[in-house]
């Protein structure tokens, strides 16, 4: 690919020694060790127990010690508490009235399970899966809208719904990451939150309540990694794909969610190079949804991991059993999550690229044909990397480390023709997500 003139001019302005120290991000052996410690056999053990509760329907039995959502959520809670004394485990309880959605047929107490690993700062990074399950009872065609909007099924809330893949796979992924991060010996700048959510099958209710509570408390949340149906490598059409994972993100282009998705692909390419992240420029699968959307609706950056080949015949019925889960594949998806979370949690927060009035701090100085970028300093940053691409391109074409400065000029770079962004880098080379300079919306 031909390097544009602006890249050539900019590169010669950076001292060779600085470029060597802060070149393209490399792997951190501590993160590689964390990623390698993910246990597929432990996730299998966890999932056997979780699916063994028979059903985890949000409206199922809460009194039995062996069957139903009550037994399942208490087991998840207890297992997370046993995992590590570093984890602060609690129930996030909500009382949901009958009629909240067409699938809430009576008043119900809904409990999310939350495990917090405190970091040096209050900045939070979440990873989630929904532990509730659903047996549609033959009332809805598999593969269609799974988050409400269809006629209310008449199925029994206690029908068998083992939910091994939907979403036992995402739930045990979260539980395993809680163990791995708590046992890593690393001190993270960000606070990590591992959450198993209920009410997803009734319209994202558990996640929506959690997101609203976090927003009301003004808690700084940088990212949410949602995992829903991430364990199957064999599609219903017989096609096998154990080497890729889909990642959905809310637009528009250069939104915080899209930036997070691109960060994941960039990071996974270094730490899990054999597992390709397939970026999907849409909210979720066609006509479907997941808990990351509940966070998007509250203004947070959230993305949704989905297996590349779904088997719709094993969703929302009694057939969603362990034989539909590949633990080698689930392990790879857990490693992609872990690497991305670890880098993000060690890196500084991304620099702010807008003024107090929300205007992008980008202008044409000094010549009127240059790109003059300014940004606010990020706590813990040792330097910054700027990125740019042609305005029609979907991902960044060029990047340049510019040192520990808070402004930089790319000569002969017309801001009408290029999109620019900035990431913060710490002294160990951990890089934040990229904040792009997005034109302010018109006021007319």
Image: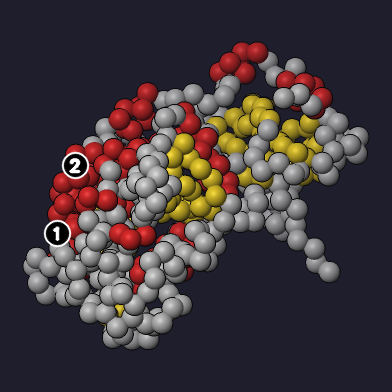
Q: Residue at x 60, y 41 (%)?
A: 434
Q: Residue at x 82, y 41 (%)?
A: 417
Q: In this rendering, would 381 be left or right of 330?
A: right
Q: Which mark is residue 52?
A: 1
**246, above or below 314, in the image:** above
Q: Quadrant of residue 394?
A: top right
Q: Are marks 2 and 1 in contact (CB under 8 Å)?
A: no
Q: Quadrant of residue 181?
A: top left
Q: Where does label 2 land, which residue?
A: 42
- Residue 361 location (% of width, % of height): 74, 46
Q: Residue at x 83, y 44 (%)?
A: 416
Under circle 1, the secondary element is loop
Q: Residue furthest top?
A: 16
Residue density around tag 2, few if under 14, some if 14–19, many if 20 or more, within 10 Å: some
Q: Quadrant of residue 75?
A: bottom left
Image quarter of the N terminus: top right
Mark 2 or 1, closer to the camera: 1
State the CA–CA distance, disc 2 to disc 1: 15 Å
Q: State whether residue 347 appears in this view.
A: no
User: Along the line of sight, which residue is nearer the eye, 51 or 391?
Assistant: 51
User: Along the line of sight, which residue is nearer the eye, 52 or 29?
Assistant: 52
Under circle 2, the secondary element is helix
Q: State whether residue 266 appears in this view.
A: yes
Residue density around tag 1, few if under 14, some if 14–19, many if 20 or more, within 10 Å: some
Q: Residue furthest front?
A: 237
**413, above or below 114, in the image:** above
């Amino acid at each position: 690919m031909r390097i544009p003139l602006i890249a050539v001019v900019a590169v010669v302005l950076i001292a060779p020694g600085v470029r060597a120290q802060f070149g393209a991000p490399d792997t951190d052996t501590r993160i590689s060790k964390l990623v390698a410690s993910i246990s597929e056999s432990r996730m299998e053990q966890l999932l056997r127990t979780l699916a063994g509760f028979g059903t985890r329907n949000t409206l199922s039995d809460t009194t039995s010690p062996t069957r139903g959502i009550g037994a399942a959520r208490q087991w998840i809670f207890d297992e997370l508490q046993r995992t590590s004394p570093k984890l602060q485990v609690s129930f996030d309880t909500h009382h949901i009235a009958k009629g909240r959605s067409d699938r809430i047929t009576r008043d119900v107490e809904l409990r999310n399970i939350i495990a917090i690993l405190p970091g040096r700062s209050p900045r939070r990074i979440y990873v989630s899966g929904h532990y509730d399950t659903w047996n549609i009872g033959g009332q809805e065609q598999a593969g269609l809208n799974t988050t409400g909007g269809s006629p209310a099924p008449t199925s029994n809330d206690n029908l068998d719904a083992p939910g091994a893949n939907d979403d036992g796979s995402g739930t045990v992924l979260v539980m395993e990451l809680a163990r791995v991060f708590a046992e890593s010996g690393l001190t993270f700048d960000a606070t990590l939150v591992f959450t198993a959510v209920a009410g997803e099958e009734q319209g994202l209710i558990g996640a929506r309540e959690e997101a609203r509570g976090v927003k009301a408390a003004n808690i700084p949340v940088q990212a949410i990694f949602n995992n829903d149906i991430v364990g199957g490598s064999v599609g219903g059409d017989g096609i096998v794909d154990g080497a890729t994972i889909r990642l959905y993100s809310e637009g528009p282009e250069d939104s915080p969610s899209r930036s997070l998705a691109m960060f994941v692909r960039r990071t996974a390419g270094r730490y899990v190079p054999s597992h390709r992240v397939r970026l999907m420029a849409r909210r979720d699968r066609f006509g479907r949804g997941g808990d990351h959307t509940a966070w998007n609706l509250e203004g947070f950056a959230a993305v949704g991991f989905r297996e590349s080949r779904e088997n719709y015949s094993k969703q929302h019925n009694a057939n969603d059993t362990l034989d539909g889960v590949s633990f080698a594949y689930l392990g790879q998806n857990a490693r992609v999550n872990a690497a991305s979370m670890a880098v993000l949690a060690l890196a500084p927060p991304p620099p702010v690229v807008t003024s107090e009035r929300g205007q992008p701090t980008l202008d044409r100085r000094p010549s009127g044909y240059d790109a003059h970028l300014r940004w606010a300093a990020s706590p813990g940053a040792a330097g910054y990397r700027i990125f740019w691409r042609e305005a029609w391109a979907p991902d960044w074409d060029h990047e340049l480390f510019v040192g520990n400065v808070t402004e930089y000029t790319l000569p002969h770079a017309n801001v009408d023709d290029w999109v620019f962004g900035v990431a913060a880098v710490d002294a160990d080379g951990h890089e934040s997500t990229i904040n792009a300079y997005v034109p302010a919306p018109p006021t007319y």
